[in-house]
């Protein structure tokens, strides 16, 4: 699961979603995988006169480098791939929308504790205004043997 915060100047903004990330450990310190993520993000100004809602689905190739082989394993990583995005914005009496597929990438850091995983990611969606967002993720790994 994830909690997202859209980038921008709106006073109220947040979102939620979920992800699946199958991966393969190439070595004890290097993992490669695919990240499939779906998120809904919303934002509003202080008076509620401008409101936007975005839906994003991303499909990325990822890589992580684990800084340790102990039970507590901090990691740094990145990913690149396609973001399918859609956005609806209401400002006063104006209604606008945008949708499409865009290239994006994500730098990330986190900690793996046994099979529990948490991390921060900053999703950068090129060519789509209001598509960038920070996400905090929490999940667990299935398989991979004893950690």
Image (cartoon, helix red, strand yellow):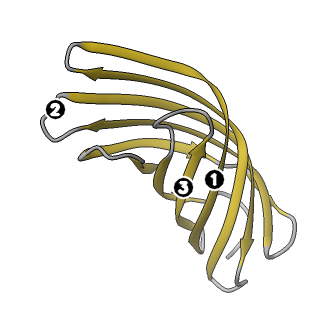
In primary-sequence order, the first of circles 2 and 1 is 2
- Tag on residue 31? none
Rendered location of residue 53, percent (x, y): 36, 29
Dot 1 alpha-carbon crowd within 10 angstroms: few under 14, some 14 to 19, many 20 or more: many
Residue 50 appears in which quarter of the rendering?
top left
- Compared with residue 32, is residue 58 higher up or lower down, i.e. above or below? above
Query: Is disc 2 surrounded by few (<14), some (14 to 19) or many (20+) residues within 10 Å?
Result: some
Of residues 121 and 26, the one nearer the viewer is 121
Vertically, is 18 above or below 92? below
Left or right: 129 as drawn, with respect to 61: left
Q: Earlier in the sequence, mark 3 or mark 2?
A: 2
Q: Which residue is mark 3?
A: 122
Q: What is the CA distance from the residue labelled 3 to the residue labelled 2?
A: 26 Å
Q: Residue at x 17, y 28 (%)?
A: 49
Kindly check if marks 3 and 1 are in contact, taking CB atoms under 8 A apart as contact: yes
Measured from the top left, where is residue 144 in percent x and y? 74, 64
Disc number for residue 48: 2
In the picture as drawn, the residue positioned furthest to the right comes out as 26
Q: Residue furthest left?
A: 47
Q: Are marks 3 and 2 in contact (CB under 8 Å)?
A: no
Q: Secondary structure at mark 1?
A: strand
- Foreground mark, 3 or 2, reads 2
* Residue shown at 54% from the left, 55% from the top: 122
Above or below, 90 against 121 in this view is: above
Q: Disc 2 and disc 1: Cα gap in Å?
A: 30 Å
Q: Is residue 14 left or right of residue 49?
A: right
Circle 2 SS class:
loop
Residue 40: image location, x then y, percent: 42, 34
Q: In the rendered image, which residue does mark 1 sit on? A: 106
**Residue in the foreground of this view, choosing between 122 and 40:** 122
* Residue drawn 45% across the image and 41% down it: 17
Report the front residue among 87 and 71: 87
């Amino acid at each position: 699961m994830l909690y997202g915060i859209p980038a921008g100047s709106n006073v109220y903004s947040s979102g939620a979603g979920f992800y699946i990330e199958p991966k393969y450990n190439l070595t004890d310190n290097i993992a490669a995988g695919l990240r499939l993520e779906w998120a809904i993000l919303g934002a509003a100004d202080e008076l509620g006169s401008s409101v936007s809602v975005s839906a994003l689905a991303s499909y990325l190739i990822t890589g992580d480098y684990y800084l340790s082989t102990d039970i507590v394993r901090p990691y740094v990583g990145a990913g690149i791939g396609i973001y399918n995005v859609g956005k609806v914005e209401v400002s006063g009496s104006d209604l606008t929308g945008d949708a499409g597929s865009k290239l994006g990438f994500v730098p990330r850091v986190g900690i793996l504790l046994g099979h529990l995983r948490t991390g921060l990611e900053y999703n950068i969606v090129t060519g789509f205004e209001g598509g960038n967002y920070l996400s905090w993720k929490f999940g667990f790994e299935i398989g991979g043997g004893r950690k």
